[in-house]
Image (tube, rainbow, N blue to C red):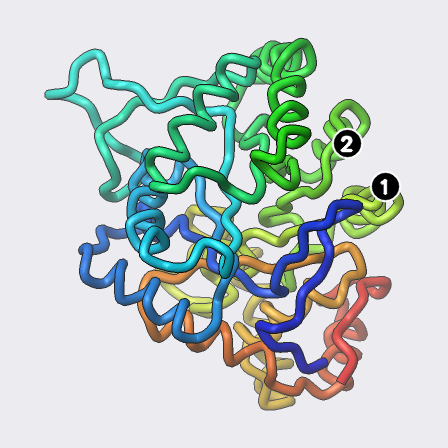
Amino acid sequence: MSLTLSDRRRVGRTALELPVLGFGAAHLGELYQKLDEAQSQATLEAAWDAGVRFYDTAPWYGRGLSEHRLGGFLRTRPRAEFCVNTKVGRILARPVDPASFSTEPWAGGLPFEVVFDYSYDGIMRAYEQVLQRLALNRVDSLVIHDLDTLFHTPELVEFHTRQLLESGTKALAELKTNGDIRAVGVGNNIPGELSRKLGEIDVDFAIIAMPYTLLDQSVLHTDMQQCLDRQVGVIIGAPFASGILVTGSGAGAKYAYGKAAPQVQDKVRAIEAVCQAHDVSLPVAALQFPLAHPAVVSVIPGAAAPGEVTQNVAALAIAIPPQFWSDLKAGGLLDPDAPVPER
């Protein structure tokens, strides 16, 4: 499989088409470490110069910092040349006590508190805020963000889901009907929780972060199949599993935004052995793997430095021998039914 940034895929049943590779802007919000302005802008410059034209961000990323940085860059570029996806469900507000406020879990970020609100008014207010932070008067798509048990208790999931169904979906439908956005998506982090969302909410695509990567295909026969059956496009967030599939195993490796557990490290080491046997780069395999699934529209790896962006773009065109995928499946390291890239 040889892909380029000029390859585009349609998002569900909409007219929106996205490049197969985008830029995940969570690192601009200082995910694991602080990032100075010069490096953040150099990273965005490198992405643009390499041909990247699809950008994914969110109010949560650095509590608004990611959107500010991305918008500051994109406002000087021709609007017709790029697509932006951001998210709703969170409003940013002044903390009750600014002097003692912590921006955790972000290493840096901006000093704003998060208020979850999936109601009509909450989504419209979030939409207005993201436009201002991005310095744009429209975005291409909006995602219902983090409505799952990773961020809420089961009781709050129920409460916010009622908010969304009673009035929030009306806001998103209005924005799409009026042409303010071109597609509506839903985010998902937890295996199995997407199925309910797709049964209750009419969306064009889903961002699936973590449960479908080279390391984990636990939603292949559930969420991924349901998206395919419903003609819901899939954007793969965190194709590097939040770190370990680009850094490799070892001390400090990150998985699911935390320290990689021993069993995760063991599996990655086994995958690395197959990579070494076939002279295949682990990050290249991780980036190309999800794009073989027929539901997948795009992958959006993050980057915190210019070289990381150029490596991601270059990875699209690198040939991987078919035997590599066969050996992963034979070793029980890849679901035997998982679609794999064709050479």
Q: Quadrant of the N terminus?
A: bottom right
Is there CB contact under 8 Å for labels 2 and 1? yes
Residue reaching furthest right?
229
The part of the image, by quadrant, that contains residue 20 is: bottom right
Q: Which residue is mark 1?
A: 230
Three-letter code for the amino acid on which mark 2 is drawn: Leu
Q: Position of residue 242 (x, y in %)?
A: 48, 54
Q: Residue 122: horizontal and vertical position, in percent?
A: 49, 16
Q: Nearer the viewer, residue 105 or 138?
A: 138
Q: Is residue 273 above or below residue 121?
A: below
Residue 198 has which mark?
2
- Which structural element holds mark 2? helix
Q: Relative to 245, is 188 above or below? A: above
Q: CA distance from mark 2 to mark 1?
A: 9 Å
Residue type, numbered disc 1: Arg
Q: Horizontal placement of 269 versus 177: left or right?
A: left
Question: Which is more N-terminal, label 1 or label 2?
Answer: 2
The answer to whether any part of residue 229 appears in the image is yes
Asked if one can make out residue 30 in the rendered structure from this viewpoint, the answer is no
Residue 119 position in % (x across, y down): 56, 13
Q: Secondary structure at mark 1?
A: helix
Q: Residue at x 17, y 14 (%)?
A: 97
Residue at (45% x, 45% y) in the render: 57
- Name the residue: 76% across, 79% down: 327
Q: Which mark is residue 144?
A: none
**Residue 269 sits in which quadrant?**
bottom right
Comparing 312 with 148, the one in front is 312
